[in-house]
Image (spheres, rainbow, N blue to C red):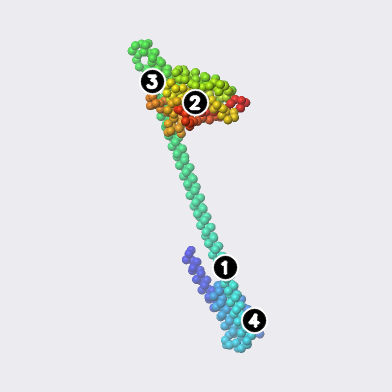
Amino acid sequence: MLEAVPRRARVARIVGWAGALIGPAAVTAVLAHLGGPERRDYVFVYLGLVAVLGVLDGLWPSVAAAALSFLLVDFFFVPPVGTLTIADEQDIVNLLAFMATAGVVGLLASHRRRALLEARALAESLRQANAELARLNKEQAAAAKAALTLARSQEQVRALQELDRSRRQLLASVSHELRTPLGTILTESTAPAADGRAEVEPRLRVIAEEAQRLKALVDDMLDLAVIENGTLELRLEPVRLADAIEAAVERLHRASPGRRVAWEELAADLDVLADWGRLLQILDNLLANADRFAPPGTAIEVGIEPEGQGWVAVRVRDHGPGIPEELRDRLFDPFTRGVTEETGRPTGTGLGLAIVKGLVEAHAGSVRLEDDDGPGACFRFTLPLAEAMG
């Protein structure tokens, strides 16, 4: 493509110079046979030829054609004919005027031709630039599309890997939690009794305790499945918050009689819009979690205060070691468990806080771990007031 342009330019120059030399001679051959009394008027024919050559071939071919035309007109049409001698002063003036006019016409025509060529070159450059830009845009669009497809594929792979990790973790946790009580139940129920009834009764108590533990795990898993599937049904009604806290504290004392719970009944003397059973489940899980990690002899604090217009905030604080930094981001994920200071082993099923989060959000509230300077861990959740929703 780059070699074809100079080749065409060389051919155009050769044709231009050939026209400058052959054109005046051909015009002269034709006019010489026409005859006529005013042969001096033939100069205008040459003038037109010079203008055409200036437009087509540029300045110098038109100047050469003008000079050759001057000589041919002088030789063939200006007396004395057949010589380059001019006898009449008027003919000299006419020939000089022809030469000047031919030069001006050729110059203007060559300028016009140069401008036309430059415009064509600019148009070609713009066309090539547009074509290159279109190609680059097409390549960029294809690259962007490929990058987007790759990003989506990577995101899908990460999502699948996370799902597989969660499923493996869930299977491992469920298998472990189910295997322990089932193994205990099987051991105590199949081992032979050496001393009759005296040894049977303790074993029955162990079996009953492990069966209760197993039932609690199954109940928590079923509750979590209902919450995650979005099929949880609530029977919302006005519930006195103080009654719910009092009932939850009594249930905690059945498992931990020595644990003190500090709360103000007057602050909790208000009605919230809640499901009684699910509200107790929220409080049970938070109190049990606080009791599990709080040192013996310390109190669990339950605080109640208004939260904006139409809401109430409930805080449950223990005086334990607090939440490790590595657990904070996944604290409300299923099967996330802390470690007690006494045993150094994980406690609970790891489903309690996940269920609390699901139940609170089902009541249109929110729950979070508060970052404050107080002792231990403080969980805060909100509930709507019944009078605001009425």
Which residue matches tag 2?
316
- Quadrant containing the C terminus is top right
Mark in the foreground, 4 or 3: 3
Residue at 58% of width from left, 77% of height from top?
Answer: 103
Image vertical order of residue 71 relative to residue 361, above or below:
below
Question: Picture quarter containing residue 31?
Answer: bottom right
Dot 2 or dot 1, earlier in sequence: 1
x%, y% of residue 264? Answer: 53, 21
Amino acid at pointer 1: Ala
x%, y% of residue 320? Answer: 43, 26
Q: Nearer the viewer, residue 32 or 218?
A: 218
Label 2 close to label 4 by CB (< 8 Å): no
Which residue matches tag 3?
184
Dot 4 or dot 3, earlier in sequence: 4
Which residue matches tag 4?
41
- Crowding at dot 2, Cα within 10 Å, few <14 / some 14-19 / many 20+, comes out as many
Dot 1 or dot 3, earlier in sequence: 1
